[in-house]
Amino acid sequence: MPLYEYRCDACGDTIEVIQKFSDRPLHKCPKCSGRLRKLISRTSFHLKGGGWYVHDYGGSKPKAPAAKEGSGSDSTSKQACGSGSSK
C-alpha cells in the first residue's frame, strides 16, 4: 500500500499515512482539526547504473564471436565420419 503525506494548513504539521488506492483522502488534521492538503512526494528509490531498459529491453543483444574457419575439431570429425565406410 502506498504511503501518502499530508500537511495541515492551520498548524503546518506534516503526517504520513499508509492508505489503499481506493481509500478517500484525509481532510481533517488529527492534531488541530485544520484542513489537510495531500503533498506530492519524491519516490523512495533511485535507479543507478547503465539502466535496466538499455541492457535488457532496448535493442539487439551482442552477438557471440564467430568461430574461425578451418578450426581443428570440425574438420577432423567430418573426415573421420566419411572415411571408414567405403567398400
Image (cartoon, helix red, strand yellow):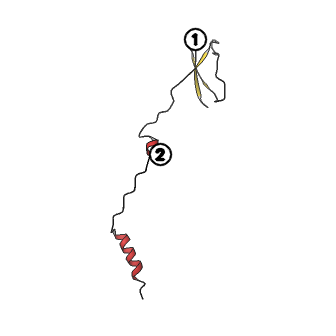
Quarter occupied by the C terminus: bottom left
- Callout 2–callout 1 Cβ contact below 8 Å: no
Compared to residue 43, the image places residue 26 above or below, namely above
Q: Residue furthest bottom?
A: 87
x and y, in percent, of residue 39 in the image: 55, 21
The label number, if any, that marks residue 57 in the structure image: 2
In which quadrant of the rendered view does residue 3 lie? top right
Q: Residue 27 — which label?
A: none
Q: Measuring 43% from the left and 43% from the top, which residue is drawn there? A: 54
Q: Earlier in the sequence, mark 2 or mark 1?
A: 1
| Image height of 59 relative to 5, above or below | below
Q: Is residue 46 left or right of residue 75?
A: right
Q: Which residue is mark 1?
A: 11
C-alpha separation, residue under disc 2 versus residue under disc 1: 48 Å
Amino acid type assigned to the residue bearing label 2 in the image = Tyr
For image coordinates 33% across by 66% down, the residue present is: 69
Please state the total of marks drawn on the protein image.
Answer: 2
Q: At label 1, which amino acid type do we have?
A: Cys
Which part of the image, by quadrant, shows the N terminus?
top right
Q: Give the answer, above or below, for where 47 lies relative to 61.
A: above
Q: In x, y percent, where is residue 6?
A: 58, 20
Please name the residue shown 44% across and 45% down the image. Answer: 55
Residue 71: x percent and y percent?
34, 68
Image position, residue 84 (x, y; %)? 41, 83
Q: Nearer the viewer, residue 9 or 30?
A: 9
